[in-house]
């Protein structure tokens, strides 16, 4: 499946074309909506194969924050790990988490988009179970938010998908993971070879997502799947490297440069020294939420509020919930650079 990069990129492109054409479209005032986007929780049953287990506490804190501020909650797929576990077992382990999410859905402020690991939610017996926590909200593959200005004119679109479009995972893939990989994962804590864990696969997939988004006008792609936080087509660690270069050129103090250097290496270690296939001067059209299943118990997500878009990280490293804004930009400015061949990246 992974041998031909060109064929792989073509398949992802075709899948994203279809997802966009079939997506429901919502008109959203650019300054009038608050929403937070999380993905890739991979909730299991609380054992060593459960990637969400160390992140449960900080995720609960984040949900409390966003509910209090009346954010809209968008869950972008792979929330439950249904390749490995039955939904009823996941619910039994994480009913408290589901009830916190349920508050958003009861107010009409929740959206669920399915990924490759939780598409079994569409099965009738699973749908009945999950409906009681989502207020029977639609389970979508894709959603387009059409941003409008104060006069109602369209500024551009945000396409929300999980990010696995175009790549088909067979019943055999799922059978192998469930029957053979899960017992190994319980013993070792290792993760299965997917775009989120296999660097060669992730590099190709990340390039495919960016390649498609860069060929669209008036559109930003927001997805998950790779577990790699990306903002304006720049990986988190890429942005830190550029910031470090700017600090050195501007004559910043040695202490400031040293702390930025420390943060860069901390991020690289946290992301398992992830590299990026994205270009050094990218078109700012591709965003990735990262995931809610980092080994250190932190989570990342995308916020949109007051006309701005942010990559945020939640952590409890200091013994209390902490929300960190990693990067931020004005939506209208980014969309202005994603049309008519304008590809410059706005200054941070």
Image: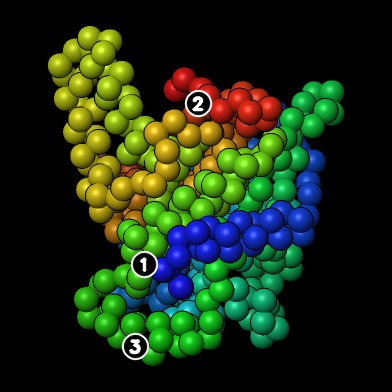
> Which is more N-terminal, label 1 or label 3?
1
Q: Which of the 4 image quarters holds residue 324?
A: top left
Tell me whether the residue at label 2 lies in contact with that at label 1, contact meaning CB atoms closer than 8 angstroms: no
Q: Which residue is depicted at the point 33% across and 82% down?
A: 181
Q: Which residue is depicted at the point 38% across and 90% down?
A: 179
Would you call the spot at circle 1 few (<14 residues within 10 Å), some (14-19), or many (20 or more)? many
Q: Is residue 70 left or right of residue 210?
A: right
Q: Number of callouts in the render?
A: 3
Report if residue 135 is visible in the image.
no
On the image, the x and y values in percent for residue 280 come to: 39, 34
- Number of the label disc, if any, that sits on residue 180: 3
On the image, the x and y values in percent for residue 25 come to: 79, 49
Q: CA distance from mark 3 to mark 1?
A: 17 Å
Q: Is residue 327 left or right of residue 213?
A: left
Give the camera-side residue of 191 and 11. Answer: 11
- Number of the label disc, if any, that sits on residue 345: 2
Q: CA distance from mark 2 to mark 1?
A: 34 Å
Q: Which residue is depicted at the point 67% across and 82% down?
A: 123
Q: CA distance from mark 2 to mark 3?
A: 45 Å
Helix, strand, or loop for circle 2?
A: loop
Would you call the spot at circle 3 few (<14 residues within 10 Å), some (14-19), or many (20 or more)? few
> Which is more N-terminal, label 3 or label 2?
3
Q: Which of the 4 image quarters holds residue 250?
A: top left
> Which is more N-terminal, label 1 or label 2?
1
- Give above or below for 138 relative to 13: below
């Amino acid at each position: 499946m992974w041998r031909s990069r060109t064929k792989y990129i073509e398949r992802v492109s075709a899948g994203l074309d279809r997802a966009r054409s079939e997506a429901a479209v919502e008109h959203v005032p650019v300054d009038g909506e608050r929403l937070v986007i999380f993905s890739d929780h991979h909730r299991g049953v609380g054992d060593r194969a459960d990637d969400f287990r160390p992140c449960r506490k900080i995720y609960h804190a984040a949900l409390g924050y966003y509910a209090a501020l009346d954010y809209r909650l968008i869950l972008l797929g792979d929330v439950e790990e249904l390749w490995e576990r039955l939904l009823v077992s996941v619910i039994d382990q994480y009913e408290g988490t589901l009830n916190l999410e349920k508050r958003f859905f009861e107010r009409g402020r929740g959206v669920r988009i399915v990924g490759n690991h939780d598409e079994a939610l569409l099965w009738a017996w699973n749908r009945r179970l999950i409906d009681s926590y989502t207020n029977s909200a639609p389970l979508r593959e894709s959603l387009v938010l059409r941003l409008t200005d104060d006069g109602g004119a369209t500024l551009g679109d945000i396409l929300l998908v999980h990010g696995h479009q175009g790549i088909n995972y067979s019943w055999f893939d799922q059978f192998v993971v469930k029957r053979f990989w899960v017992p190994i994962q319980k013993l070792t804590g290792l993760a299965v070879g997917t775009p989120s864990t296999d660097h060669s696969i992730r590099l190709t997939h990340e390039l495919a997502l960016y390649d498609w988004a860069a060929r669209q006008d008036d559109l930003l792609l927001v997805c998950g799947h790779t577990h790699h936080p990306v903002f304006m087509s720049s990986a988190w660690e890429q942005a830190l490297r550029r910031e470090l270069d700017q600090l050195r050129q501007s004559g910043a103090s040695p202490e400031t440069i040293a702390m930025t250097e420390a943060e860069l290496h901390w991020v690289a270690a946290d992301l398992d020294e992830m590299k990026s296939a994205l270009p050094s001067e990218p078109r700012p059209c591709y965003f990735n939420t990262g995931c809610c299943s980092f080994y250190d118990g932190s989570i990342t997500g995308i916020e949109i509020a007051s006309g701005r878009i942010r990559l945020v990280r939640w952590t409890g490293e200091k013994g209390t919930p902490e929300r960190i804004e990693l990067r931020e930009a004005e939506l209208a400015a980014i969309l202005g650079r994603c049309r008519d061949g304008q590809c410059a990246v706005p200054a941070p």
